[in-house]
Image: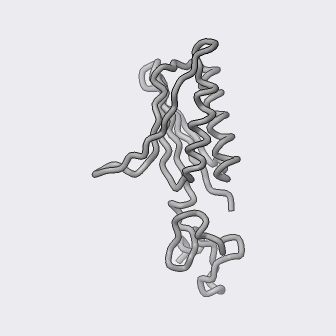
Amino acid sequence: DRYQRRVHGSSPSSNNTPTTAMADASMYGDADDSGLPTASARILVATVEFNPPVIRLIGAIKRSTIDKLQEVLPKITTSAPGQTSTCEFVHKAGAGVAPHWAAELKAYCSEELGQALLFLTLMDVLEEEGSWKLRASNSINHDGTKVTYKFVFEKKI
């Protein structure tokens, strides 16, 4: 049907044969019986909540990308010269909770410039390490001090 063709990249005349770009779907971690990546394996949602910053990553993300984020985020989230913050992503899953990675930067309070730097760093790491491309974003201002940003990425093929 039309949804299957759009998600799996096949046409009615191709007998559901994968397109050349999708032939190596196993590298994306989640594939169906045809070896094609499922839609969920190609989508990553990053939610960043301020203040303090809490980062949640939902999707098929490589451990090496998580490691890179843990390396670079403390370098940009210092509040004073000589001090460093900590950033440790923890994998969370359970009843009623979608599997995801989460990190809280407890000692860091960020204004607009710091938030922009955090977003830029997050996007750079996801693009360089994980081949993710930004597709959509939105933000919600909860009460004047608490703001949630959501970024939707798609895996480059």
Point out residue 152 in the picture as x, y percentages from the top left corner.
57, 47
Instruction: Locate residue 48 relative to residue 153 in the image: left or right.
Output: left
Q: Is residue 139 above or below residue 43?
A: above
Which residue is depicted at the point 50% across and 53% down? 59
Q: Residue furthest left?
A: 95
Colouring of the image? one colour
Q: Is residue 97 above or below residue 35?
A: above
Pick whichever, 64 or 9, lies toward us.
64
Q: Residue furthest front?
A: 82
Residue plotted at (47% across, 35% down): 103
Seen in the picture, residue 107 relative to 121 is either above or below; the reply is above
- Residue at image position (42%, 21%) is 143
Residue 43 found in image quarter? bottom right
Q: Residue at x 28, y 51 (%)?
A: 95
Q: Residue 122: x and y, percent?
A: 62, 37
- Which residue is at the front of the view, 35 or 144? 35
